[in-house]
Amino acid sequence: VTLVGEMFPADPVGIGMMLEPLGLAAGPVVPTREWRELYAALDGSVVAAIHPFYTASFRQFELAGRKIVGSAPVGHDGTEAWLESIGAACNVAGEKIDAAKKRFLPMIKAALAAKPIDARITVSGYEGSELLVARLLI
């Protein structure tokens, strides 16, 4: 699975752990460090659009015949939907998708329950674009 978007160093490792029960692996991260890595990125069977801003890159992957799966595994519901979408895009058996969800979703649910967010509006992000959304909401 080719990952598109800026990543913290541990992100591909964590995503790879979620992909492993599906029989998949995390591939190269785009943007790449070297042009040679772009060739490896095209070898992925599907592209995970971790950040939505790379529309020109997604068009190139689509021209190369790669499916694009939007969003990222964020939160309980987002991770569940992401696992289902990645699995479906790669023709993974439903039992494997269910096994991955059974493995990771309870951990996410427990972590969220241990640190609940008690707020009217919560804005989260690290790229700065979330501030534009927050201004619209407030």
Image (cartoon, rainbow, N blue to C red):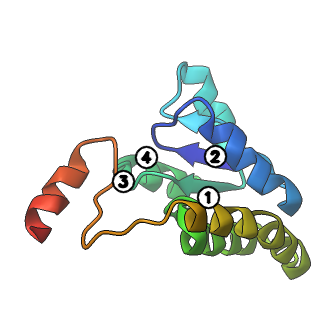
Which residue is painted at 60% across and 40% down in the image? 11
Q: Are marks 2 and 4 in contact (CB under 8 Å)?
A: no
For residue 85, which quarter of the picture? bottom right
Q: Nearer the viewer, residue 83 or 87?
A: 83
The residue beneath circle 2 is 2
Using the numbered discs, state the Cα–Cα distance from disc 1 to disc 3 in whole angstroms. Answer: 14 Å
Mark 4, residue position? 57
Q: Secondary structure at mark 3?
A: helix
* Residue pictured at 17% horizontal, 51% vertical: 131
Discs 3, 4 touching: Cβ within 8 Å: yes
* Residue type, label 4: Ser
User: For this view, does 1 lie left or right of residue 48?
Assistant: right
Q: Alpha-carbon neighbours of circle 1 within 10 Å: few (<14), some, or many (≥20)?
A: some
Which of the numbered marks, if any, corresponds to residue 1? none
Give me the C-alpha separation between circle 3 and circle 2.
Answer: 15 Å
Secondary structure, mark 4, is helix
Identify the residue under disc 1: 66
The residue pinned by badge 3 equals 55
Looking at the image, is mark 1 or mark 3 earlier in the sequence? 3
In 3D space, how far apart are the residues under numbered discs 2 and 1 (Cα atoms)? 10 Å
The residue under the point 55% across, 18% down is 34
